[in-house]
Image (tube, rainbow, N blue to C red):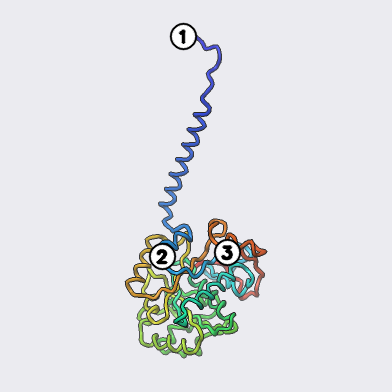
Amino acid sequence: ASIPEAPVSPKKKLILVGGIVAGSLLYIVTAFVLDLMDPSIKTAKEIRQLFKYTWLGMIPESRKKGLFWQQKINGNVPQLVVRDVPHGITSEAYRMLEANLKFLSPDQVLKRIVVTSSVAQEGKSTVSANLAIAMAQVGRRVLLVDADMRHPMQHHIWDLANTVGLSEVIVHQTQFEFAVREVMDNLDVLPSGVIPPNSLALLNSKRMASLVEYFSQKYDFVIFDTPPLVLTADAMTLGKMTDGILLVARPKVVDRVSATASKEFLLRSGQQVLGLVINGVSVEGEPDSYFHHAKAYYKEELITSTIPDSKTKKNHIRF
């Protein structure tokens, strides 16, 4: 065999193209596998397309380290952003939600609503608390009722005792006036009370229906924080006693199967769905959301915090 006079140069372009193709295929396969492992709905746009409810609000994700504090309880609790960081973009988002609810229907004055979600960890308790603050700050007398007697959170959020609350009021173990707590001007909170063996039976009682009417007469607005839809029928039971349901959905938490199921539950039970709140939206991750443009209006990227008193030093979680 003859020896070549010069070394044979590799086909660099072919190797480069092959490497790019192989890398692209690996990326696609990896993305596909990760998508199978994480069935959650990824974007606010996908959530709106799936539910097709009236879009009433979008709450940005809060990630600044200054927002979160250690607290000696099991788990975490969300910060009351509208109260503690009143000038941030998140607080304005809650005020926009409050205004949208106020002008939702020219023919009906809303006085009592149920706030729920499809699954846990979407932020329905956080939304309930901050929406209540936004309403109270514009002069409306508000009652926030923790009707999630399975996994109550409002007493943690507001740093309240939970020895008596809604469950005791329903069964006549205490009077409403002894169980309710004033947490700020124009805003009272009724904790859940001791977790009962059958919360649905309590909520589905004539006594609860009469309490809903009583609350509506006593306050300008009543917000019921209820369990997720796919876990219990509590929210749908209360939904029939109120003016409608406000559904909270969080990208990367709610999955398509659960979202579809909750939508079907609401339809079959004939619920009045007031609209949709998309919670925990990533400002950077969703450039087509209005927060991507609105953040430039504010001096802070998301929200900056001032440390409140020790009673409000809490960690963040989604409930």
At 55% from the left and 67% from the top, the residue drawn is 316
What secondary structure is marked by label 1? Answer: loop
Question: Cβ–Cβ below 8 Å for labels 2 and 1?
Answer: no
Q: What amino acid does circle 2 point to? A: Phe
x, y percentage for residue 52? 41, 65
64 displayed left or right of 237: right
Nearer-the-camera pick, 101 or 218 = 101
- The residue under label 2 is 51
Inspect this view and state whether residue 159 appears.
no
- The residue under label 1 is 1
At 43% from the left and 55% from the top, the residue drawn is 38
x, y percentage for residue 157? 54, 74
Give the CA separation, mark 3 to mark 1.
72 Å
Question: Cβ–Cβ below 8 Å for labels 3 and 1?
Answer: no
At 39% from the left and 64% from the top, the residue drawn is 259
x, y percentage for residue 256? 39, 60
Question: Cβ–Cβ below 8 Å for labels 2 and 3?
Answer: no
Mark toward the start of the polypeptide (2 vs 1)? 1
Query: Callout 3: few (<14), some (14-19), or many (20+) C-alpha neighbours within 10 Å?
Result: many
> Eyeballing the image, is 160 above or below 214?
above
x, y percentage for residue 268? 32, 71
- The residue under label 3 is 62
Inspect this view and state whether residue 47 appears.
yes
Give the CA separation, mark 2 to mark 1.
73 Å
